[in-house]
Image (cartoon, helix red, strand yellow):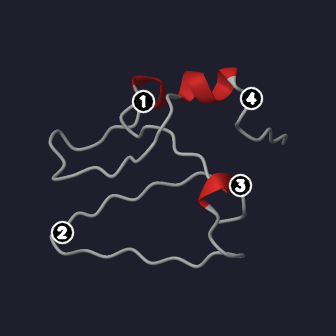
């Protein structure tokens, strides 16, 4: 994925692991977490996932209101 693109993962089996590479050192202050359960995202998650790691997350509306999301054009 190119820098700045949002992503989420869903493991469908117990004891799954996800690994990915970063293009630079991880700097938590540069990352933004949108609540994956936010109704405005309309993601169809399984009815009862075992766990969801959210951290300090914002709603989609909060992120938009604060102008925190990048703008892309086609």
Distance from label 1 to label 4 (Cα)?
20 Å
In depth, the one of 45 and 32 nearer the eye is 32
Q: What kind of element bears circle 1?
A: loop
Task: Say which label, 1 or 4, has the lower sequence index.
Answer: 1
Residue at x-position 22% and y-position 63%: 12
Q: Residue 25 appears at what percent x and percent y?
A: 67, 75
Considering only vertical position in the picture, is 14 above or below 35?
below
Residue closest to the eye, 22 or 6: 22
10 sits left or right of 62 in the view: left
Q: CA distance from mark 3 to mark 4?
A: 14 Å
From the viewer's side, name the closer residue of 43 and 59: 59
Sequence-wise, the earlier of marks 1 and 3 is 3
Q: Residue at x 62, y 70 (%)?
A: 26
Asked which quadrant contains residue 27, the reply is bottom right
| Residue tagged 4 | 67
Which label belongs to residue 68? none
User: Does residue 13 lie above or below 35 as drawn?
Assistant: below
Find disc 3 in the rendering and name its residue. Answer: 4
Marks 4 and 2, how far apart at CA:
36 Å
Q: Which residue is mark 1?
A: 42
Question: Of callouts 4 and 2, which one flags the residue occurring earlier in the amino acid sequence?
Answer: 2
Find out whether the residues at labels 1 and 4 contact each other: C-beta distance under 8 Å.
no
Callout 2 secondary element: loop
Instruction: Count neighbours of disc 4 (C-alpha within 10 A) and say few if under 14, some if 14 to 19, many if 20 or more.
Output: few
Q: Is residue 69 left or right of residue 48?
A: right
Residue 23: percent from left, percent from top: 71, 76
For the residues labelled 1 and 2, the Cα–Cα distance comes to 23 Å
Q: Nearer the viewer, mark 4 or mark 2?
A: 4
Q: Secondary structure at mark 4?
A: loop
């Amino acid at each position: 994925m190119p820098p700045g693109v949002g992503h989420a993962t869903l493991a469908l089996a117990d004891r799954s692991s996800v690994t990915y590479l970063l293009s630079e050192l991880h700097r938590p202050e540069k990352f933004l977490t949108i609540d994956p359960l936010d109704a405005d995202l309309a993601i169809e998650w399984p009815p009862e996932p075992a766990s969801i790691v959210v951290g300090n997350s914002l709603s989609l509306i909060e992120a938009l209101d604060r102008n925190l999301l990048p703008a892309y054009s086609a």
